[in-house]
Amino acid sequence: MNEPLINKPDYLFNFGYLNLDKLLRSQQKPEPFTPGEPLFWDDSHIAQQMLSFHLSQKTDAASRKQETITRTVDWLVEYLGLKIGQTVLDLGCGPGLYATYLAQQGLMVTGVDYSQNSIEYATRAADEMGLPIIYRYQDYLTLTDKAQYDLVLLIYGDYCPLSPEQRSQLLQNVLRALKPGGHFVLDVTTRAGRAKFRQKNGWYVVESGFWKSGPHLVLEEGFDYPELDIYLDQSTVIEADGKLSVYRNWFQDFDQRTISAELTRAGLRVDSLWNDLLGTPFSEGGDWIGVVAQKPS
């Protein structure tokens, strides 16, 4: 949680080493999918903050709440007719919230995530519960699994931060990993949902917060690229010694045409579209599109 600096010692407000030239450059609208700090989710402080958000039942900031996760898995098991012993690959599995419940339904689950902290937590939890889940610390863009899974999941918009080239690579990996006739299930954000969020443009100073354990200034900005259906959520963080870090979260939004076309080009067949992954029938104007696609037999 961010703790605003109120009645704190004056030294906490002294950002005397601020490099204004570097700061000005960081505030320019970047080209789409220009990266910020690499692998920031594995920073020891940020990783702990992320894990707490994943596990929180008060917010959907990192993962959906357990009730929604349970309903999603129940719907997928019923809709896809999943049977005990079938294999599932959960990409971007985080601390294993979906993987755990899938395994409790008798499915053989492999979880992949690029956060070492989340994978370690998920592995400990599976061991404690006696669940035979395989967890791997891996970038799913490097996935080489071949014809192993009846179902591949990529849930809670994890497809949207990827560049077009990364999405193409991911879809090749998913297609290779699926058994013939296997399903790929994902959900993506829409511009209708994006319009409900206030475009960020502000700042705050905290003694300790999400990004850093010590005093820091955060400049929040949102950059919209409406002609490309892309949005950037950017946080520029300046520590007391003047160190500047730029964290970027990109979002590629979709509509039913664009997501269907992208999956089809990759060789997948789109079986059905939904307004979520709870079985809500699709209609225009929703915040999300849930997609059930299939590898041809």
Image: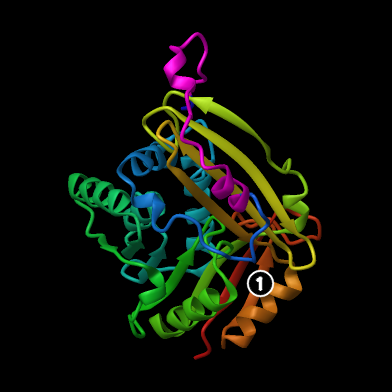
Foreground residue, 122 or 28?
28
Q: Tell me the amino acid under the disc marked 1.
A: Ser
Residue located at (69% from left, 81% from top): 261
Foreground residue, 264 or 33?
33
Q: Is residue 293 visible?
A: yes
Range covered by the magenta-colored residues: 3-26
Residue located at (38% from left, 52% from top): 94
Image position of 89 with respect to 180: above or below: above
Question: What residue would you read off at disc 1?
Answer: 272
**Horizontally, is 117 left or right of 268 in the view?**
left
| Residue 266 shown in magenta | no
The image shows residue 28 at horizontal and vertical percentages of 66, 54
Foreground residue, 241 or 155?
241
Residue located at (47% from left, 24% from top): 14
**Horizontally, is 108 left or right of 53 in the view?**
left
Image position of 272 with respect to 44: above or below: below
Which element type, helix, strand or loop, lies under badge 1?
strand
Label 1 environment density (alpha carbons within 10 Å; few <14, some 14–19, many ≥20): some
| Residue 14 shown in magenta | yes
Image position of 67 with respect to 178: above or below: above
The image shows residue 18 at horizontal and vertical percentages of 50, 37
User: Colour scheme used in the picture?
Assistant: rainbow
The image shows residue 15 at horizontal and vertical percentages of 48, 29
Total marks drawn?
Answer: 1
Residue located at (40% from left, 51% from top): 40
Image position of 246 with respect to 158: above or below: above
**Horizontally, is 8 left or right of 116 in the view?**
right
